[in-house]
Amino acid sequence: MDTTQMAIVERVAEEHRHHKKAQFFWVWGALLLMTAIEVYLTYQNLPPVKMLTILMGLSLIKAALIIGFFMHLRYEISLMKWLTMCSVVGCLILMTLFYFPDAHRILKLGVK
Amino acid sequence: MAESALPNMPSVYEPSLFGTYSKKIGMWLFLLSDSLTFGALLYAYSYGRISTADWPTPFHSQSIINATIMTAFLLTSSLTMVLAVRASVDRDANAQRLWLIATMLCGTAFIVLHGREWSKLIAEGLTLPMFPAVPGHAASSEFANVARNVPQFPATFFGLTGMHMLHVTLGVIYLGVVALRRKFIPILLVLWLAAWLGTPSYSPFHYGAHVLLIAAIVCSIILWLKPKLYDSSDVEVAGLYWHFVDLVWMFIFPLVYLMSAKIL
């Protein structure tokens, strides 16, 4: 590893030392709690579309917590955050556009 | 803080555009591409579900409880992984190794529980044409009918969860190499023999176990050709991969299991 890389690694490590350990336990607790809510809702036999909406909403929150805190993206510089997130979200939107013409059938067929 | 100029930087080099080191950027790029792989598989599953009128909901309470425990193991492994990263930046080698091993154990528990779930479903008739028939097990009508009438379900279910299980397995091996280096190779070979000889010949894991042998060969070549002490950057990059595997499961668990639950 060259000198520049070593200097950057050391600076990133120094930044990590300032993160409080307690926040990781809070995030872990929140993730477990949201999982418990998801399982609880499964046993409530909610209407499928409503269930799907709630589950995907909770999954997005869980994903944001994992990316932000566990993968440390919230501590990266703005360029890194925006490029990574915009590129993956953009590609997933493209996939949705390909998939969307048939997706309206959910209203006719429904999900069980 | 991250955008400030680096201290003692040699003048011939420019600061990193992304404010971090190359290995980490490389791993992020890999994870972005891998997220599209899983995105495509999740879309395929969802498309199959929406476009198939009699999509099955075969997961009883026992499967839901099993998948919930698997999720808890994976979430806990993410916590231990982040603590391993913290120990590595604190230069506490023992704690780093212990947290990495704890992460590997949680990952292994996830794989074992998932493997048992697969074996149970296959024995009950939810199978793919490529899987050998299970002798001595009368396929229950419910799962056999699902596999016969809606083949999209087992195809997308095994494809999606199998791809994820492969990622978790490779993640455990990756962490094993970072934590134990060459000492991990014999452990990996023992695991391969145990998985190969401990599973019946009709089980997909009997042949799937050879992934461990291939991994042992690849890891041996890497560790002997380029031995090194893994520093905090290596642990952090391995952690990124591990958290990504956890992240993907946060979508598979509700979409595949919770939305296909049969709670009576």
Image (tube, grey):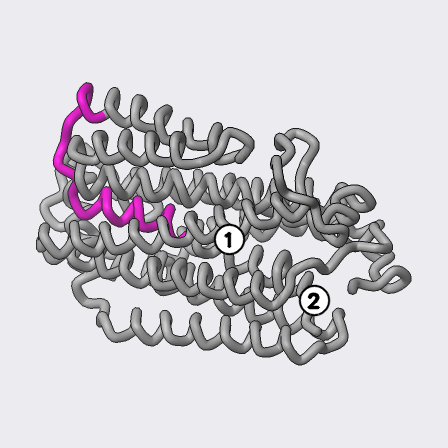
Mark 2 chain: B
Q: Is residue B131 left or right of residue B238?
A: right
Disc 2 residue type? Lys
Q: Give above or below for B68 relative to B166.
A: below
Regarding mark 1 in the picture, which secondary structure is present there? helix
Quadrant of the rendered structure where residue B58 is?
Answer: bottom right
Q: Give above or below for B254 relative to B38.
A: below
Name the quarter where the C terminus of chain B is drawn: bottom right
Q: How many marks?
A: 2
Name the quarter where the N terminus of chain B is drawn: bottom left
> Which badge, 1 or 2, is on the more N-terminal residue?
1
Q: Nearer the viewer, residue B121 or A75?
A: B121
Disc 2 packing (10 Å; few <14; some 14–19; many ≥20): some
| Residues rendered magenta in the picture | B223-244
Identify which residue is drawn at 46% across, 39% down: B166
Q: Is residue B3 among the parts visible in the rendering? A: no
Provide residue B187's location: percent of width, then percent of height.
23, 35
Identify which residue is drawn at 79% across, 48% down: B145
Q: Nearer the viewer, residue B209 or A41?
A: B209
The residue where tag 1 is placed is B248
Q: Is residue B40 left or right of residue B67?
A: right
The residue where tag 2 is placed is B262
Mark 1 chain: B
Q: Is the residue under label 2 in contact with that under label 1 (CB below 8 Å)?
A: no
Provide residue B195's location: percent of width, then percent of height.
38, 35
Provide residue A95's location: percent of width, then percent of height.
69, 46
Q: Are marks 1 and 2 on the same chain?
A: yes
Provide residue A49's location: percent of width, then percent of height.
75, 70
Q: Residue furthest bottom?
A: A44
Regarding mark 2 in the picture, which secondary structure is present there? loop
Q: Residue furthest front?
A: B136
Identify which residue is drawn at 16% across, 34% down: B183
